């Protein structure tokens, strides 16, 4: 058995699909680091998204109680079945992870999500795995380095993505990976991002829906003052928006990217108490 993705793909007469972001990780240190970062507890399930040729899946299967691996590319079925034949605790699912009902797949067990994803689905996938009523304890994703940096941003560089992820958990960059860690080599550097989720968000807001309505409104107009963006996004006048923002102790001329998580929380409370 070989775990070299290039040889494996050759053996099965397959070529990696660029459109599915198929850059397979083969650096043993990187694979080990990802498994260690997941810090699996004995009873937990791992949901792996995009197992590819199964290099990470096999390592996860050695330490996890159950592994549910969701791969969209049916062509990889024979590769994964052969590579993972020795692991009775791996359950392979062939479907688009964005459409998968992850809670149904994991049942009542605690779980962790591990993924090495194409750039274009990362934001959507983070939302798909975080916006559920029973969240994974941790999410470990390998993404483009630039995207990982955007997720861990601080006030001054915040974005809808950063606020959304930081609402649900604490993100940190565990390690950076050079293109040579993958086959075929991608054009950009990658990073392993770990998001430790909160049982309950530390922000005191009435509910998730109001929080996201306010944040989306705040980021709805690029490079515009918060009062204009909020007015446009919430369908209220600029004067009303300015009054709400001031009531939250925030200067209405600031821009959305400068607000801290606590300030988004304060703004949400004011919007809710104004009945908007
Ligand atoms: N985990 C493997 C590794 O580390 O070598 C493969 C990583 S490769 C960057 C991304 C994998 O995600 C590919 O196998 C690709 O087919 C799969 N993929 C892409 N889009 C997907 C989706 N929407 N749902 C599930 N898997 C997807």
Image: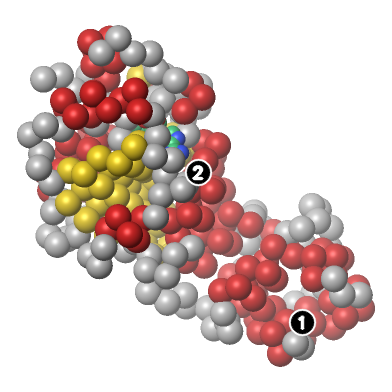
Q: Specify whether tag 1 is near ligand 1 (CB below 8 Å).
A: no
* Figure disc tally: 2
Q: Secondary structure at mark 1?
A: loop
Dot 1 corresponds to which residue?
Answer: 276
> x%, y% of residue 156?
67, 58
Q: Which residue is more in the foreground, 182 or 177? A: 182
Task: Return the mark for residue 235.
Answer: none
Taking the image as drawn, is residue 165 in sight? yes
Q: At x 30% / y 55%, what residue is drawn?
A: 105
Judge left or right: residue 156 versus residue 117. right
Judge left or right: residue 41 versus residue 160. left
Quarter holding the C terminus? Answer: bottom right
Q: Secondary structure at mark 2?
A: helix
The image quarter containing residue 5 is top left
> x%, y% of residue 152?
51, 54
Q: Mark 1 packing: few (<14 Cα in 10 Å), some, or many (20+)?
A: few
Judge left or right: residue 84 versus residue 239. left
Q: At x 14% / y 62%, what residue is drawn?
A: 43
Q: Is residue 204 above or below residue 8?
A: below
Dot 2 corresponds to which residue?
Answer: 122
The image quarter containing residue 78 is top left
Q: CA distance from mark 2 to mark 1?
A: 32 Å
Colour scheme: secondary structure
Q: At x 63% / y 62%, what residue is drawn?
A: 155
């Amino acid at each position: 058995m070989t775990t070299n993705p290039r040889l494996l793909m050759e053996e099965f007469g397959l070529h990696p699909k660029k459109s599915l972001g198929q850059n397979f990780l083969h650096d043993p240190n990187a694979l080990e680091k990802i498994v260690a970062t997941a810090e699996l507890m004995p009873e937990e399930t791992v949901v792996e998204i995009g197992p590819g040729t199964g290099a990470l899946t096999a390592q996860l299967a050695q330490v996890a109680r159950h592994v549910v691996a969701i791969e969209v590319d049916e062509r990889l079925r024979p590769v994964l079945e052969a590579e993972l034949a020795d692991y009775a605790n791996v359950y392979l699912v062939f479907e688009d992870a964005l459409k998968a009902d992850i809670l149904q797949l994991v049942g009542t067990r605690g779980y962790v999500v591990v993924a090495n994803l194409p750039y274009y689905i990362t934001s959507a996938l983070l939302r798909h795995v975080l916006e559920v009523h029973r969240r994974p304890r941790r999410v470990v994703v390998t993404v483009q380095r630039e995207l990982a940096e955007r997720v861990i941003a601080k006030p001054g560089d915040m974005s809808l993505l950063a606020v959304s992820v930081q609402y649900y958990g604490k993100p940190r960059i565990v390690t950076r990976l050079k293109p040579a860690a993958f086959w075929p080599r991608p054009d950009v550097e990658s990073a392993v991002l770990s998001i430790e989720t909160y049982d309950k968000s530390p922000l005191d807001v009435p509910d998730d829906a109001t929080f996201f309505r306010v944040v989306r409104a705040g980021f709805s107009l690029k490079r515009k003052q918060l009062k204009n963006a909020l007015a446009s996004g919430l369908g209220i006048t600029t004067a009303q928006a300015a009054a709400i923002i001031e009531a939250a102790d925030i200067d209405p001329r600031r821009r959305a990217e400068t607000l801290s998580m606590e300030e988004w929380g304060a703004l949400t409370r004011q919007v809710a108490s104004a009945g908007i």
